Amino acid sequence: MHVVIASLNPAKKAAVEQAFRAAPGIEGTLFSAVAVPSGVAEQPLSDEETRRGARQRVLAARLVVPEADYWVGLEGGLERIDGAWMGSAWMVVVNRAGGEGMARTPTLPLPPAVQALLDQGLELGVANDQVFNTRDSKRKGGAFGLLTDGQLTRAEVYAQAVTLALMPLLHPLWRA
């Protein structure tokens, strides 16, 4: 089984590997990662744009590695809800037969200091690095890890969403 991850980000790669290794009926999985464009802004600013970015990453990865069995696109984004910036991410999984599953992570409230930097046009990872005095956090625990003191990490939360996105492709109720 060959799974292509449409990102070189270590946290995203770890999430996909964790979800697929735990998935029923998937064994002996080979993972590869490719850098592909999302076709959306570097920092998506709506739920719809974030979902579209994940889907477009899958399509681009499928063109690069057409012989794979699964392709996975992961895209994090922001959305204003009741005047406050919130973070979330979409996962899209496509299989060789063209079946598609998608799921979204929980919505992450962001602190005022981060929101102020987002209002200045900074990308979430850059804003987090400034506020938390860290470096390259989006490739590590991400905002989830920083804001929960490591109780949740970006990879763990993304892995849960990838697991949910796999359901329509693996669970028998979708084949009925």
Image (cartoon, rainbow, N blue to C red):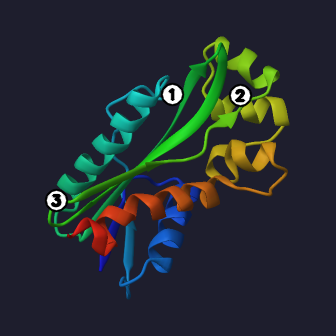
Q: Is residue 142 left or right of residue 66?
A: right
- Counting other residues with Cα less than 10 Å from the Cα at mark 3, is it few (<14), some (14-19), or many (20 or more)? few
State the residue at coordinates (32%, 72%).
Answer: 170
- Which amino acid lies under the numbered mark 1 shown in the image of this protein? Gln
State the residue at coordinates (39%, 29%).
Answer: 48
* Of marks 2 and 3, the one in the foreground: 3
State the residue at coordinates (17%, 62%).
Answer: 66
Mark number displayed over residue 67: none
Looking at the image, residue 169 lies above or below residue 116: below
The reply to whether the C-beta atoms of the residues labelled 2 and 3 are less than 8 Å apart is: no
Residue 136 visible in this rendered orientation of the protein: no
Q: Position of residue 17 (x, y in %)?
A: 49, 71
- Counting other residues with Cα less than 10 Å from the Cα at mark 2, is it few (<14), some (14-19), or many (20 or more)? many
Q: Earlier in the sequence, mark 2 or mark 1?
A: 1
Pointer 2 residue: 127
Mark number displayed over residue 98: 3
Mark number displayed over residue 43: 1
Looking at the image, residue 129 lies above or below residue 97: above
- Which amino acid lies under the numbered mark 3 shown in the image of this protein? Gly
The reply to whether the C-beta atoms of the residues labelled 2 and 1 are less than 8 Å apart is: no
Residues at marks 3 and 1, CA–CA distance in whole angstroms? 28 Å
